Amino acid sequence: TLIDANRKKNGVYIGKIKTMNDDRIIIKIGSTNEINTRATALKHTFGEFILLDFFPSNRHTSLESAILKHPSVYTYKYSEPVNEVVSTELFCIEKQYYRS
């Protein structure tokens, strides 16, 4: 699996945390140094977490910050609570961009 292939690696992840009723999904973009542990925690927090992509990087926190601030990404920012949790790293995109 994608998680197994990137165990113990620093990197930036993109994961689906919710499917909307209108062909959109809520994704979370974040950084970690242990995707297996992070994926388990996110599933507990949001009720769902499916890892869609993982980008290994030695400078994963800088990469994450650059992605989150980029205008092409920021325009999709999602500020509503998911599972009663508000996160600054959530984005709402059309699900055609990712298959899961």
Image: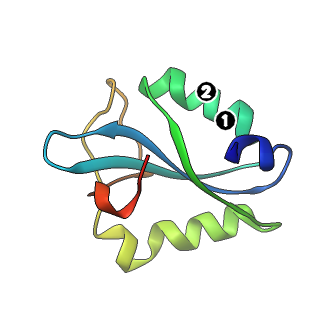
Count of marks placed on residues: 2
Disc 2, SS: helix
**Towards the viewer: 80 or 28:** 28
Identify the residue at image location x=28%, y=34%. 81
Q: Is the N terminus in the top left, top right, bottom left or bottom right quadrant?
A: top right
Q: Does residue 95 appear in the picture of this structure? A: yes
- The part of the image, by quadrant, that contains residue 41 is top right
Q: Could you tell whether 79 is left or right of 4 in the image?
A: left
Disc 1, SS: helix
- Relative vertical location of residue 17 with respect to residue 67 in this rendering, above or below: above
Does the CB distance between marks 1 and 2 fall below 8 Å?
yes
Query: What residue is shown with label 2?
Result: 41
- The part of the image, by quadrant, that contains residue 47 is top left
Question: What residue type is disc 1 on?
Answer: Arg
Q: Position of residue 43 (x, y in %)?
A: 52, 26
- Relative vertical location of residue 92 with respect to residue 84 in this rendering, above or below: below
**Towards the viewer: 12 or 100:** 100
Q: Of all residues shown, which one is farthest toward the left? A: 22
- Per the rendering, the mark at residue 100 is none
Identify the residue at image location x=35%, y=68%. 74
Q: Residues within 10 Å of mark 1 (few under 14, many from 20)?
A: some
Query: What residue is shown with label 1?
Result: 38
Identify the residue at image location x=56%, y=73%. 66
